Amino acid sequence: MGVTMDEILEILEKDARVSPEDIARMTGKSLKTVKQAIAKYEKEGVILKYKTIINKELIKDTDASVRALIEVDIAPQKDVGFDKIAERIYSFPEVSSCYLVSGDYDLLLIVEGKDMHTVSNFVAEKLAPMEHVKGTSTHFLMKKYKENGVMLKHKEENKRIAISY
Amino acid sequence: MIKNLISNKVQQMQPSGIRAFFDLVLGMKDVISLGVGEPDFVTPWQIREEGIYSLEEGFTSYTSNKGLYKLRLSISHYLKNKYGLDYSPDDEILITVGVSEGVDLALRSLINPGDKILIPVPSYVSYGPVAELAGGTPVYIDTKDNNFRLTPELLEKHIDKKVKALLLNYPANPTGVSYAQKELSEINRVLLKHSLFCITDEVYADLTYDFEHTHFAVLPGAKKNTLYLDGFSKSYAMTGWRVGFACGPKEIIAAMTKIHQYTIMCVSITSQMAACEALHSGRKSVEEMKREYHRRRELVVGGLCKLGLGCHMPEGAFYAFPNIKTTGMKAMEFAQGLLKKEKVAVVPGTAFGKEYDDYIRISYASSFDNLKEALKRMERFLEKNG
């Protein structure tokens, strides 16, 4: 059973729109088994969400947004370490990702806003003044080449010859 | 006049009967092609990167005729560790320009005029012509009435004093048929009984879905009678690099190397360096691609059965070879109609021998979306023309 589960996840991770019917056909499992497995994954939170990866580079002037990687230096608190302060930070909707990392600083955030001004304001008015935040360093993203395993470029033409032995 | 310049042997070679159909496909735009005999994946990046790096480092020379020692050593280790196959990198392995050159060298090394080579058919298109070029006589063993499988009985029936070797390809192009160890053992017993040599083309070995691939040379008593041909093209998606290898008794490898050194000299060093990297870091990619092909196989074979195009379950490679008799069409008519009306390309069975007029070859080395769309179009085609 374990193998089947993994394969369903592998298929969905590559393409969330593959239908349960097709997954059943591809894996040789019954439709019912596949549907139950997916429902279970969703319930257990193994599958969190189905999202679409959009190449925003190709969308001109519509809801342009900027992203920044922000390094946050934090003074950990007694008993709760970083968790409490991390929660205060990642609860802001502007924060799309939040990681505790090793190295020179503690939290690495990915923050999104409609322009640089918005993101700067968030840092200056919300993040930096927060108690236990000792310092921040903001890096605005300039160009996206690859995200979550997907390369952001135009579809490549087929390089194979169309028919061969 | 010029025609008289061409050797009789080559003049007598039969050109492929379906060249015109291939040209038709190549001339059309926006075709979904299920007619391709190579992976749809590009070579995994780390392998490509190694090729680029070797060029940057200035590796632009010849290599030894047998191929880079480190590649032969890596192949030797890999075969030993994974399959318990023992081939010395010094004199039992030769790097060839794909398996195609391996087949050519093997046949030219073994054949005396008039020797017969047994070839189970339908088969990959080069075996017969190359055997003839080498001065031999191909003897085709038709496996159609036996689910495209070679059996000991079929084999036995075709053996006479002139037969020198069997050329066995498994998993097979175009049928996808492969053999479990037990079947191979029975075939091997017949070969040993008649002291016949076996040339195996196992280039699709890594793409075996229902059981573990058994190398012919691991069978009892087989190794000294077997020349094992393999390559990087299919498993590592490296068709364009043209790297294969031949493993066998040192006398035969020496004979092949003689021809190879005068005709080819050596395989491109860039490709050999990339092949080293493939063995070093490419296995994970091979497994991923194999799982993907496996899923596509289920989709395609299931889909074909639903369309009434009966087809045994191919155990390996990335081909299905369905029977189209129920459509009332012959292979070429079917392929041309499907191409013109629905822009889907398949290879007519007649490409692999005129007897296979009731079959088409479908390659599932194509994206899942393409395969689904192609099946839909085939359904529409059959509704209108079936």
Image: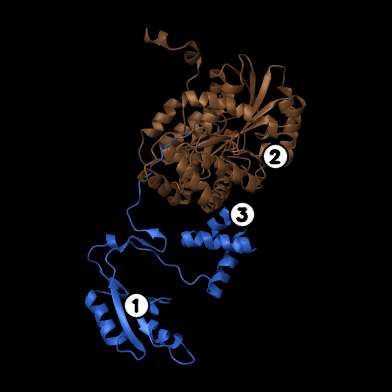
Q: Amino acid at mark 2?
A: Val
Q: How crowded is the residue under tag 1: few (<14 C-alpha within 10 Å), some, or many (20+)?
A: many
Quarter of the figure with residue B57: top left
Q: Nearer the viewer, residue B69 or B382?
A: B69
Chain letter for the blue part: A
Which amino acid type is shown beneath numbered disc 1? Glu
Q: Label 3 belongs to which residue?
A: A28
Q: Whole-Å distance between the Cαs marked 3 and 1?
A: 47 Å
Rendered image coloring scheme = by chain
| Left or right of residue B163, residue B59 in this image | left
Q: Measured along the vertical axis of the image, is residue B1 above or below residue B58?
A: above
Disc 2 crowd rating (10 Å Cα; few below 14, some 14-19, many 20+) is: some
Q: Are marks 2 and 1 on the same chain?
A: no
Q: Are marks 2 and 3 in contact (CB under 8 Å)?
A: no
Q: In this orientation, does residue A65 appear? A: yes
In the depicted view, which residue is nearer to us: B147 or A46? A46
Q: Position of residue B342 (x, y in %)?
A: 42, 40
Residue A71, label in figure: 1
* Residue A105, horizontal then vertical, whole percent: 38, 79
Q: Chain of mark 2?
A: B
Given this view, does label 3 or label 1 mark the residue nearer the observer?
A: 1
Q: Secondary structure at mark 3?
A: loop
Q: Which mark is residue B218?
A: 2
- The crowd level at tag 3 (other Cα within 10 Å; few <14, some 14-19, many 20+) is some
Chain B in the picture: what colour? brown
Residue at screen point 39% across, 30% down: B24
| Residue at the image point whose x is 22% and y is 78% from the top | A117
Left/right of residue B31 with respect to residue B307 in the rendered view = left
Amino acid at circle 3: Gly
Q: Is residue B351 left or right of residue A123?
A: right
Seen in the image, is B149 located left or right of residue A154? right
